[in-house]
Image (tube, rainbow, N blue to C red):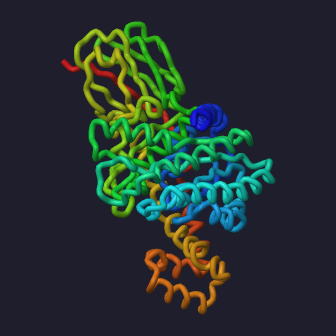
Amino acid sequence: MRSAQLKFFACIAIASVSVQVSAQNVAPFKQGDRVVFAGNSITEAGYYESYIWLYYMTHFPERRFEIFNAGIGGNRAIDIYNRLDADVLNNKPTVIALDFGMNDSGFFEWNQPDKAAQATKNIARSLKEYQAIEKRFLALPDVKKIILTPSLYDETVKNPKNYWPGKAAAIDSISKFQLASAKNNNWGAVDFFHEMTDITLREQKKNPEFTITGPDRVHPGPQGHFVMAYIFLKAQGLAGKPVADVAIDAKTKKVIKSVNATISKVTATLNSLSFDYLANSLPYPIDTVPRIWENPYKQSDVLPFIPWTKEFNTEQLTIKNLQGKNYRLKIDGNIIGTWTAQQFAQGINLGQLQNTPQYMQAEDVRRLNQQRIEVEGRLREYYWIQFNYLQKHNMLFDDSEAVRDSVEAQAKKDWGVAAKKDSYMKARVKETRDAWVKEMNGYVNKIYTINKPVKHKIEVLLIP
């Protein structure tokens, strides 16, 4: 018994080391990268990938690369393996991020008397299926690999729905062999499962109904996807890189500090200070609308419980030695707000202010990215039908009328096919698919045209 316990704790220690080592191996994306996220329904939803890309679009506006969604709802590792050539490698990736485990760990069997045996079976099956993917990956030495542990199954939230006791432990076991594989192969890894679990347990001490998934305990809404993006970007070592951090001495008119920005034409009078400001990045715009079906949460809901603003969205403006009491801040002639001299001396985070011209510019980028993901969603519904139904019946990419009739018939008895059918019926016409891809590319082209920061005139004016 003691030997088994020692082995168990040794595995935990190894997994912990794996997280630390792997996180260091997740290199930031670079110019020209083609990044494919392959996974299940959470990846198919597209939001965590979209939020990651939006960070790069705004923080590194000159660093253009592509992200491809290769998520299919309901997939286990074997399903991803079966579509590697047709849905992942066909995108000619330079980076592949692989997510599986939520479906592999099972669902309804967790309420059966033999759930322990089922758990052992599911974990062993998942490992075997993953090893087939691992073998394919090892034959791709020029492609960087990132292993993503599953997102959270929220077993602890106060919620009567979809309670499958033991599922989280099975996901934990899957995540351990995922992290071990990443370490052994010197691949990157991002540990969604343990990071999301830690956040959830911390917040549920304050509110037992808190969750970063949704009503079904499985599928995160925009707030959960944003947590995933936060964890991913931290693993890439990008936390702590400010949008800008500038400080000026109003008395001497000297620039004390200028990080990721250029300050010029500093002028000052007894009652005012003005200067030109050009940041190298835009602030990160936050969505305030629920986006995922039957999930009430918004991206903005995440801000109270992760330090996103501090770590990823600091656009700090500090003015020292203002002699008056209260001052008005203007950017390009527009009033942004009023602060005391003491507040200016401590620093104001412009990144949180949605009325600055740079934030509004970033918001235009976010809206275009949202339009892109909506088109992408329709295209992924088409591929859901292809890989979850047609591939299994040897009809993959057969756009004949007979196959159309088969999909129509299946939709009458399969809610999944029924939910995706409308998009499939449109996209089975190649010209429609091509038009959707062209539309998405158009949004990306526009984004990389409008995302370049511009010079602004900043004025700090004494309020009489």
Residue positioned 55% across, 41% down in the render: 191
Residue 349, given in percent of the width and then of the height, sits at: 38, 28
**Is the N terminus in the top left, top right, bottom left or bottom right quadrant?**
top right
Q: Of 422 and 23, which appears nearest the observer?
A: 23
Residue positioned 36% across, 35% down in the render: 202
Q: Is residue 339 visible?
A: yes
As drawn, is 459 to the left or to the right of 369?
A: left
Give above or below for 421 relative to 60: below
Within the image, what quadrant is residue 432 found in?
A: bottom right
Residue positioned 51% across, 20% down in the render: 258
As drawn, is 96 to the left or to the right of 276?
A: right
**Is the C terminus in the top left, top right, bottom left or bottom right quadrant?**
top left
As drawn, is 285 to the left or to the right of 34?
A: left
Q: Of 270 and 432, which appears nearest the observer?
A: 432
Q: Residue furthest left?
A: 464
Q: Of 68 and 436, which appears nearest the observer?
A: 68
Residue 60, given in percent of the width and then of the height, sits at: 57, 39
Q: Residue furthest front?
A: 1
As drawn, is 420 to the left or to the right of 26?
A: left
Residue 226, given in percent of the width and then of the height, sits at: 44, 46
Residue 30, given in percent of the width and then of the height, sits at: 67, 42
Count the labels in the image.
0
Q: Is residue 441 visible?
A: no
Q: Of 361 and 106, which appears nearest the observer?
A: 106
Residue positioned 37% across, 63% down in the render: 293
